[in-house]
Image (cartoon, rainbow, N blue to C red):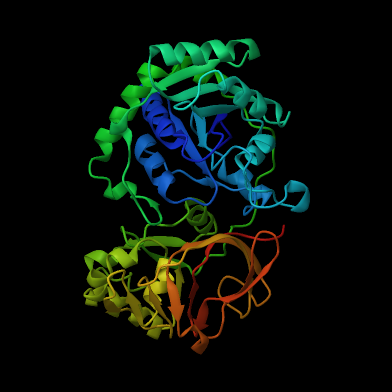
Amino acid sequence: MSTPPGLIVAAPSSGSGKTTITLGLLRALRRRGVDVASAKVGPDYIDPAFHAAATGRPCPNLDSWAMRPKTLAATRRSDSDVLVVEGVMGLFDGANLGEEHDPFGDGSTASIARRTGWPVLLVVDAARQAQSVAALVAGFANHDPEVRLAGIILNKVGSVRHEEMLRRALLPDGHPVLGAVRTDNTLARPSRHLGLVQAGEHPDLEAFLELAADRMEADLDLDAILASARPAAASTAGASPPLPPLGQRIAIARDPAFAFCYPHILAGWRSAGAEISLFSPLNDEAPAGDADAVFLPGGYPELHAGRLAASAGYASGVRRRAEEGAVIYGECGGYMVLGETLTDADGTVHPMLGLLPHATSFAEPKRHLGYRIATALADIPLGPAGSVWRGHEFHYASETGSDAATPLFRISDATGTGLGTIGGCAGSVFGSFLHLIDRSGA
């Protein structure tokens, strides 16, 4: 595989509508017969699942803070005609004080644009402005000479007259307007505490994607957008897998309760020779009987806690693998189900696997969010004590009883500020609230 021509869909801020525009653009290009692939900047599980539904291809993440440069290079490779990358937050919003303070990068969309040379389509929420749009675009266009704007997409345009005012204001600066998308409340998507409802739970995802594609075909200059894509700057791939395989035969939980698993992690395990099988705890499926490792990724187990507690086949299957010495690893939601109990938002206590001595609760939710540097405090299948990884934390659960287990990681945030310890391990079972993205170092 090689790196196809690419472009980045970004915005001045979150909430500008770049995800909906990206999804409509992806499906519209696919309907044209373009073999389009996508990627998402930053640590995100929700948007990539929508991307995958729109294109029919897995959507990897590109994260300049959490990924080594070689991991980034390997992740962006594809056999597609064009790669459309959706940014994160505002174009220049990053994790810390800038790339000069971190050997990896700051995690911003702009950082990906600098490294690849891909041009940026800037999605501007024009709902509450007219001529002022020119000052906004000029600021973003001139802020960093290494980040090149390919054009502007005006979003939430109210009328023909409004569009004319916006286009006239932008004309002197010479940045082409490649689309003006009218306000359309039918394209809104439902959300919950961790963000948008997952793609697999969308009430009518195909209809939504087709409607979004119809709107983008009508309101965007698709030919000009395709023509703006550029090859990426040369880079060297060939990094070691982001995470060492947990075993030779890895069983992975996969359903709406355990949906948060990065494609680049699975690709790394497969490239290292691991065999991967899937099972659904919500359908009371047990992991493969010959699996020497079980991975319970993040997701929404708190929304399905009663059903998980009643799934005796799944629970006995995981416990049996643990009794027979298989590696059992849980991240975030997967870590929650490894504990003794999970208390849902209504205060109902549900028994979980009981393989680690902690309990989690959503009775009094508190958000934990941010990039993390994690150093192993014990020898684990991912590496010896002292090994370092980068990842992120995003959950609302509280935890009790974790002091009874051996702590798994010592963590700090993106600025290096220490945050104490997290997670636990006991025998071949280990896990934490962290979503690991890549090993740190070369």
Instruction: Count the labels in the image.
Output: 0
Can residue 5 be seen?
A: no
Can you tell which quarter of the image residue 441 is in?
Answer: bottom right
Residue at 33% of width from left, 70% of height from top? 287
Image coordinates for residue 212, horizontal then vertical, percent: 33, 29
Of all residues, the one furthest to the right in this rendering is: 100
Relative side of 203 to 257, left or right: left
Residue at 31% of width from left, 69% of height from top? 345
Residue at 57% of width from left, 64% of height from top? 244
Considering depth in this image, is 395 or 299 the residue closer to the camera?
395
Residue at 37% of width from left, 70% of height from top? 362
Image coordinates for residue 353, horizontal then vertical, percent: 34, 80
Image coordinates for residue 216, horizontal then vertical, percent: 38, 23
Of all residues, the one furthest to the bottom in this rendering is: 404
The quadrant of the picture occupied by the C terminus is: bottom right
Relative side of 2 to 68, left or right: left
Against 381, is 401 above or below?
below
Can residue 138 be seen?
A: yes
The quadrant of the picture occupied by the N terminus is: top right
Considering depth in this image, is 94 or 295 the residue closer to the camera?
94
Against 241, is 142 above or below?
above
Image coordinates for residue 278, horizontal then vertical, percent: 34, 61
Can you tell which quarter of the image residue 391 is in?
Answer: bottom right
